[in-house]
Image (cartoon, helix red, strand yellow):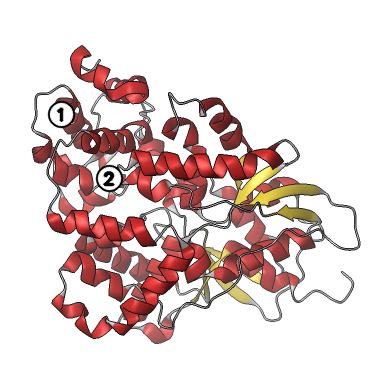
Amino acid sequence: MLHTLQSETLGPHGDAMSAAVTACVHCGFCLPVCPTYRELGQEMDSPRGRIVLMKNVLEGRLDPDAARPHIERCLGCLACEPACPSGVAYRDLISPFRANAGSDGRGRPSRLDRLRRRLVAATLPYPKRFGMAIRLAKAAAPLASLLPKGLGSFFTLLPKGLPRPEAPPVSERPSGRKPRARVALLSGCAQQVLAPEINRAAVEVLLANGVEVVVPPGQGCCGALSWHTGDLPAARDFARGNLDAFLPELDSLDALVTTAAGCGSGLREYPLILAGTDREAEAKRFAEKTLDISVFLHRLGLDPPPPPLPEPAVAAYHDACHLANAQGVTAEPRALLRAIPNLTLRELPGAAFCCGSAGTYNLDQPEIAGSLGRETVARILLSDPEILVSGNIGCLTQIRHHLAESKYPNRAPRVLHTVELLALAYRNAPSGV
């Protein structure tokens, strides 16, 4: 167990953190699946190494600054969890540790780190601000080479064109049939700017399957970016805002669906984020209703089945870490894709390896993120699909960027979200179906 004096400072997260630390037997099964250990080959950049570092910091035996570089290099991909025979809940340790290590001033992040995080926190979770920031960044792109890597890397990941202003989705009922189910849709924040077509496709597919879609006003960022970077107060503010927006509808819903793996994982962590507050019980109810859209559609059953694609196509599926590892969702998206006639699904070598996106990781650790992105693209090009499918906006953005930057951009497959490919099939349906 953690040293009593130190664990008392951890508040409502103390028991979960202590359980994660004590469950680890340092067996090493996590090493081969950890992206940073594979990249750097250092024990302290592996899950078991970080657990030892965090334990010693929490017990007051190690200066937080000695652990900080290794803790910050963790992507939070959670590949260690399914690989762990002892069932260590690493997610219950890494984000709470970051929150606690930053909440009392311990450790000294650099001025650049503080500036970068403030800029991200002030823009990315807010679609209008984020869209404006992209436009400003485009105008300032010629100066990108003069900026430090942590800020300059932001420019390399921007979409080639300016973001397309588009109204967020609205509540809709299926026409011509009795609703089979009723769901609420999380609109998300960055995705609304970078790829608004994903939410549009999600609504299309849900309506085609007889599902009423509710888009509660007042919802906002899920808070995952704040939570995973240790900003607990901001994460709690976002969580409370979404509880206020969704709870009036919750009892009438079959599910609260998300189209971004990171957001879905973040919503399901609300009980941990709001632990010890007066909203903890509500957070548990909220998390229990949250499902990735692929899981919801698979459980509901596609009705009608998707029509055939206009032409035969070959697709490969990339597992987003916060879908496969954090939520245990791997079979459902593949089952949906296999249900599309004229589509052949090809397994991607190393489909579960992290692509290096991981929220703001491209800004925080651009070298490691770039290496993982190039490695992912090399596996995709080796598999040679016509379409690359994934279930997370961060992965889609990262993969598109590195495909365009590869030696063979002319071989790059079309990159789509799972629901976008389903929507393409349903758009091919005969009139009246």
Seen at 44% across and 42% down, the residue is 237
Q: Residue 62, can we see it?
A: yes
Q: What residue is shown with label 1?
A: 57
Position of residue 58 in the picture relative to residue 288 (left or right): left
Amino acid of disc 2: Pro
Rendered image: mark on residue 32:
2
Name which quarter of the figure residue 339 lies in.
Answer: bottom right
Rendered position, 38 above or below 284? below
Q: Position of residue 211 (x, y in %)?
A: 78, 54
Q: Which quadrant does the C terminus fall into?
A: bottom right
Position of residue 151 in the picture relative to residue 402 (left or right): left
Name which quarter of the figure residue 256 lies in.
Answer: top right
Dot 1 or dot 2, earlier in sequence = 2
Q: Position of residue 431 (x, y in %)?
A: 87, 76
Name which quarter of the figure residue 170 lies in.
Answer: bottom right
Position of residue 306 in the picture relative to residue 328 (left or right): right
Seen at 70% across and 42% down, the residue is 249
Q: Which is more foreground, mark 1 or mark 2?
A: 1
Position of residue 163 in the picture relative to residue 282 (left or right): left
* Secondary structure beneath label 1: helix
Q: Position of residue 343 (x, y in %)?
A: 64, 70
The residues tagged by marks 1 and 2 sit, at their Cα atoms, a distance apart of 25 Å
- Could you say which is closer to the camera, residue 4 or residue 419? 4
